[in-house]
Image: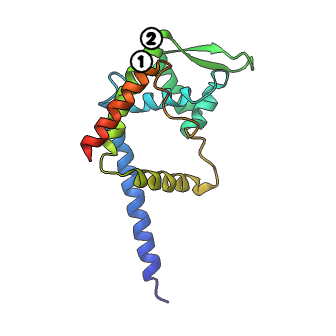
Amino acid sequence: MDYKKELHDLFLMQQAYGTLFSLINKLHITGDTYFDGLTSRQFMTIVAILHLAEEETTINNIARKLGTSKQNANRMVSSIEKLGYIEIIPSSKDKRATNVRFTDIGKQKIIECSQYAVDFMADIFRHFSTEEIETLWNLLRKLYEFDGSHQDGFEESGLPLTSDTGLGESILQHFAQKRKSLE
């Protein structure tokens, strides 16, 4: 029997996996240069916290949102707590659990990082059309579900820019200009 198609498929899968693996590392390294004192992993941990209801910000829920282990999420939360951006408080729902809450300085950092996030996203997706980004997102979600588990992602809303609509509009205007200039 001729296995040319299978050999070719296996080759493509290995190349896709290798590229994805290298890309993730490259994105972490590049992201670390954007967020002024935060690593890209710390930033994504903050984004995960922002996408959880305040009474649901347990380490388990943060880990689930990030698709990582409880130990990794705990390490990230601890590192952000040391920076003074979050604090750990007892859960009002479960006496055995704790929740994460942003400090005032943490709320300011979120606003500051919103601009950095816009620049980072515009820069890494500069060669992608809207349709290509949608296709990539759909394919990545499909790949995530290889084991039958659904991603508890960030679909509910984008990164909250701020409750100050003027600042949010300013950041979106900057993003629109940056996307246009990169075309």
- Disc 1 marks a residue whose amino acid type is Lys
- The spot of residue 127 in percent (x, y) is 30, 50
Is residue 64 positioned above or below 108 on the image? below
Question: Tag 1: Cα neighbours inside 10 Å, few (<14), some, or many (≥20)?
Answer: some
Instruction: Name, please, the residue furthest toward the top.
Output: 104
Q: Which residue sits at x=69%, y=17%?
A: 91
- Disc 2 marks a residue whose amino acid type is Ile
Residue to which mark 2 is pinned: 105
Q: Which residue sits at x=66%, y=25%?
A: 56
Q: Foreground residue, 162 or 99?
A: 162
Residue 54 picture quarter: top right
Label 1 element class: helix
Tally the marks: 2
Residues at discs 2 and 1 in contact (Cβ within 8 Å): yes
Give the alpha-carbon distance from disc 2 to disc 1, as whole Å.
6 Å
- The spot of residue 96 in percent (x, y) is 72, 20
Whether residue 31 is visible here, answered yes or no, is no
Residue to which mark 1 is pinned: 109
Q: Which residue sits at x=40%, y=60%?
A: 16
Is residue 150 positioned above or below 178 on the image? below
Label 2 element class: helix
Is residue 49 positioned above or below 177 on the image? above
Whether residue 181 is visible here, answered yes or no, is yes
Residue 64 shown left or right of residue 72 in the figure: right
